[in-house]
Image (cartoon, rainbow, N blue to C red):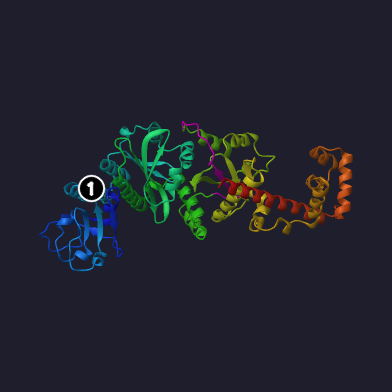
Amino acid sequence: MSVNFEQISRHFAKQAVHIQRNTEGIADYTDTILITKSLTHFAPEFIYVGNRSRLPDHAEGMEQASLMLINDAAEPSTGQPRQMYNGQNRIEFGAEEDVFEMYNQVRELFLEEAEREQAKGRMLQACVAGKGLDAIVSAAAELMGNPVIMLDVSYKVLASSDISGVSDPIWSDNLHKGYCSYDFIAAIHQMTSVQNGMKSLEAYEVECSGSQVTKLVAKVRIGSKPVGNVIVLGSTRPILQKDHELAGFTAELVAAELAKNSFYRNSSQAEYEELLYGLLENEENGQRLVQESLRSGKRLRTGRLSVMVLDLGRYEASGTYNGYLRDQLHLYFGEERLIFYHENMVGVSERDSVTAKPRDYDANMRKFLVTHQIRLGVSREFTDLAECRKYYLQALKALEIGRVVWPSEPRVLYADVQLYDLLSPHAQHDPRDVSHPALTVLREYDKKHHADLYHTLYYYLKNNQQLQKTADELFVHRNTLRYRLRQIDELIQIDLSQIDNMLRLYMSYQMTDYLDKLRAVGAMCNADS
């Protein structure tokens, strides 16, 4: 059992008038001692509390002592320069502070630390005894005085303490069902406290407007791989600062239990989710992970595959978290096994409806995505599951580029934006670097004569040189279109019956348009910031 100088400094930060740290390292203390005139030696394993007036003269070890001093007198004369105390850890207080009250507060810090160590010991005994996850979380709940829950990465409840004390109706529903609904998961992933907490290795608190219960979350990791979360619900008493450390310790014990006992992770769904997470995290070991899965008898997806990524960043749950989103996703994507990964839902699909061309895919699916502000990115098709991460990144790119090129289209295929992806490295270049010289001529002519030849040629090429279809889209008469095309021919003098010429011009339009949109989005972001 020990308390360090940083812990004590944090506790007294508001009362202190000066804090001096010995830069050589963080000091750990086994106890605290009151300063008296009879002291002859200052030991490094103690922190000393008292009035400055009672500091003994010429005490051994004072130059490296750790002191909490009430400034009731001037520094005693030692005959040595003031710099001899630079090696001290020192917290100074105003003369109005009560020395015994301060001493008692430091003693309480040591007692709390002793209680934490004893609590950790009891939890460790439960783990060593092999009583399982339920015993560990039950011990943690008893020690922290609040319900404790263990969730895996798919937000399934693996273990929980006695749930009779759970007053939060949403968590009560989650516990009775044994899993968290997609609506619930999507909502918490949008919370700032959760987004910030997920970036930290420490336990973090979560508060939301829909509940008066504070939640303490500690991530469970096996190695560097997240496998779930320990949740402490502040239903019975408020979350205390010491609970942060105990929650983190509980997460470590849970990780050790999961690592040694496959019972909790041996369902086919849990195995698949673990494989998918591993493939997304570690591309280099993809083949090894797949081979290990095959050897263990797992059925893996085969045939024409694609990775789909659902961005739920703007999804608004109904507030009831009643499973609506899970039901709807199963309706449109079948029984696809989706996992939450880096704030999105990710799955590997074997269904043609996901990769169908925009005009072919289910109108009801599109309506569902638009209504609930869900965006779907879909990779190119592939056949080797070991390459999952490569195609996951494609699906992410489809989402990213789709927001720029087709902001109103909820589903974007990477195959449709691959050209734009190739252009991304040129985003900072002058658009004229990728623009066909003929298009520059048309733009300059339009600017000078207030014409619209640039867009006329684009729609003419896009509509495969069909006059009537182009005229209808431009809202002009066929004769007006013919006149504009003659002007274009005179200006650029390019034979549009040659497929190579038509392809170069059309691709140039696509590239220029994307770079213009990308630059416009960047300008808007800069203006907002």
* The residue positioned farthest toward the left in the image shown: 38
Image spot of residue 29 (x, y percent): 22, 57
Left or right, 416 with reference to 13? right
Taking the image as shown, residue 325 lies to the left or right of residue 206, namely right
**Residue 500, how many percent across, how many down?**
81, 56
Q: Relative to 237, is 367 on the left or the right?
A: right
Q: Which residue is found at the position 46% from the left and 30% from the top?
A: 320
Residue span colored magenta: 301-320
Q: Residues within 10 Å of mark 1 (few under 14, many from 20)?
A: some
Q: Main secondary structure of the magenta part?
A: loop
Residue 103: where, in percent of width, then height? 18, 50
Disc 1 element: helix
Is residue 315 covered in magenta?
yes
Quadrant the N terminus occupies: bottom left
- The residue that mark 1 highlights is 112
User: Could you tell me the amino acid type at mark 1?
Assistant: Glu
Comparing 27 with 154, the one in front is 27
Where in the figure is residue 83, as x and y percent of width and height?
Answer: 26, 66
Residue at image position (27%, 43%) is: 139
- Position of residue 72 relative to residue 210, above or below, is below
Query: Along the line of sight, which residue is nearer the eye, 171 or 66?
Result: 66
| Left or right relative to 398: residue 257 | left
Q: Residue 474's quadrant in the figure? A: top right
Can residue 304 be seen here?
no
